[in-house]
Amino acid sequence: MKPTAGVSQGNALSYKQSGVNYDLIDPLKVAAQRAAAETGAHLATRGFEEVAASRGESAYVVDVGPFYIASIVECLGSKALVADEMRRLTGKCFYAGIAQDTIAMAINDLITVGATPLVVQAYWAAGGSDWFADAERSQALVEGWKRACDTCGVAWGGGETPALAGIVESGRIDLAASCTGLVNPKERLSLGDKLAPGDAIVLLASSGIHANGLSLARKLVERLPQGYLTPVQPGVSSLTYGEALLAPTVLYSPVTEALFKAGIIPHYCANITGHGWRKLLRHPAAHTYRIHSVPEVPPVLKFIQQHAQQNAREAYSTLNMGAGFALFVAAEVAERTAEIARAHGVPALVAGRIEAGPKKLIIEPLGVEFGDDSLQLR
Amino acid sequence: MKPTAGVSQGNALSYKQSGVNYDLIDPLKVAAQRAAAETGAHLATRGFEEVAASRGESAYVVDVGPFYIASIVECLGSKALVADEMRRLTGKCFYAGIAQDTIAMAINDLITVGATPLVVQAYWAAGGSDWFADAERSQALVEGWKRACDTCGVAWGGGETPALAGIVESGRIDLAASCTGLVNPKERLSLGDKLAPGDAIVLLASSGIHANGLSLARKLVERLPQGYLTPVQPGVSSLTYGEALLAPTVLYSPVTEALFKAGIIPHYCANITGHGWRKLLRHPAAHTYRIHSVPEVPPVLKFIQQHAQQNAREAYSTLNMGAGFALFVAAEVAERTAEIARAHGVPALVAGRIEAGPKKLIIEPLGVEFGDDSLQLR
């Protein structure tokens, strides 16, 4: 099975149907990864070396002696299209949240390796100069970006604001963030063979869809009579589908920093983005991941699952289903890890454990299993 | 005068007419720079601090103790549109060069602060999965990227290859690169008050237009009967305008690394990109920059100047006019600096000197001056 290619049955809406065809992208990715791997040796000419275990992980790590440097560039994806449509429908501007989403994509990946994020750079490529003429939207983007940097204690170094008429569509913006951080002290590195049977799996709550699965979510709108204005929980709340989708992604670095201050160093981390819970299988080692408790599913994700007519297997293989970030920690600190997350405003759950056994994820409460062939990122 | 707003006269083609309106972008830039500056203080909570002099410079620099970390994200701009059109017209694929251009945008900025580039991340956002279906083009992009990394001795850490239908135009790709490097030893930092009257200005040759001024160059095609297939030097060579535009940007980091090995530490550097030679005024201090020799102008830039009917002032305020990178060094090492550049295959010229006096650039051979109001980047 290829990444994010859901199994489509009957009237169900798979990720592939929503327009992203990984069969076309994957050969390029493989070629790029192979070429990139060959360049790691250049670091020796500077007296440094790459952390080989970081190849294929969420951030690239270099050993520069006193500490490791981690770096990354991440794209928001298509979530801004939802903000644009909701602006048209409601007049409300959602770009402060979109800014947070973009930073979260970079920060939440960077911290998986044990890094403290230091510097974020902004990449805001608009479809033309006139994108920036909407002062309310520009202002929201700047303010949201600043606030997310404040939340993560990261310095906003600068960035690029090109006007790319002819490349980016008119009226649209391509948002990305790069991030550089330090793994300091080096013991914080959460890669390699620290992960072992007996470790606990702690899941940190998501706020909703975050910024992955939006192609599917946008495709689904065509099936909804009221479109983005459809209430997500009719009778319970007036929250619309569009607003619910636009809940900003949780920034998890305050939790990982607090864990370190409390003396807890995760053995491994997974940012649950594209590929949903299959990301729990990201570590290259062969272990069995047994989940005994699943977190509450945000209403917007329940809504998507229901309207896309996805079974549990499809939903958990595409969406975060309430778990935005996974921490793999020694069993004896699992409850404490969850408590620290909660103390920082992030609901958390000791959800399962790692066992010796074939590489698979078993979500016991749902009777769902994902095998070794479910995730091919390397 | 606003950045890149050329003075338009008669039938001349200014940069503003070519479609980029900085009057719309600048308020956002100013707001973003102000907000970004406030976040620098977060580094203190990690025990570090920003190098304040790097705010407004080409790369952001943080003091992490044993060395400085520099980071950046840079966009290619619209040069890929020329490659796309030339593919259509000639069947030739130019994406290996486009890859080098993209990396050069990041590397050549990063090295201005004295940094050795360590890691590059790729940001390749396509208008849809099918962009990647063109195997020849994908392959050229990967190979060119790899080769540029090899030239610069930098590790390709990874990156993003999103398919962004609805944001990036169908059939197009938005290319950018982020780069992280070290200023190591810290004495290599080429920011702040090292620059002083008496210093020499060494100009490193460009290979052509590089990746700035392409909006103007593309606009100009409408005036050419044979469009991109117009010979740049009729009677002398069959090189077409399109091919000449697509000469890959020079990567200057081999030169800056060689200078360091030879014991030469520039006092300041300027990557000559947008704003052309006005970039020589980038340093915040008030000095007079007197140019006594100008480098040879690449045929494609002469061609643009002629067909856009630009006078020298307009051309040098927009295009690099043969100077891709400026090194400001102590006068006694100026000739040696130029020799080292040449030994690394980059023609170089001791072009002028810095004098005490009001902030201006005097290009004596052309009778052109740019004053303090010519460049507003901060």
Image: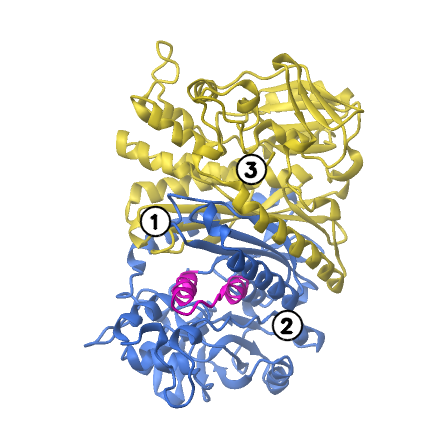
Chain colours: A yellow, B blue
For mark 3, give the secondary structure: helix
Residue farthest front in this picture: A10
Q: Quadrant of residue A289?
A: top right
The reply, left or right, for residue B197 in relation to residue A264 is left
- In front of the other: B231 or A50: B231
Residue drawn at point x = 47 percent, y = 39 percent:
A20
Please name the residue that numbered disc 1 is placed on: A169
Q: Amino acid at mark 2?
A: Pro
From mark 1 to mark 3, how far is it between C-alphas? 31 Å
Question: Which of the numbered marks, if any, corresponds to residue B254?
Answer: 2
Q: Chain of mark 1?
A: A
Residue drawn at point x = 36 percent, y = 50 percent:
B28
Give the mark toward the camera: 3 or 2: 2
In the rendered image, residue B165, in percent from the top left (x then y), is placed at 41, 44
Whether B112 is drawn above or below A11: the answer is below
In the rendered image, residue A224, in percent from the top left (x then y), is placed at 33, 22
From mark 2 to mark 1, how far is it between C-alphas? 37 Å
- In front of the other: A80 or B68: A80
Can residue A345 be seen here? The reply is no
| Magenta residue span | B77-103
Magenta run includes residue B89: yes
Residue farthest left in this picture: B10
Q: Chain of mark 3?
A: A
Number of numbered discs: 3
For mark 1, give the secondary structure: loop
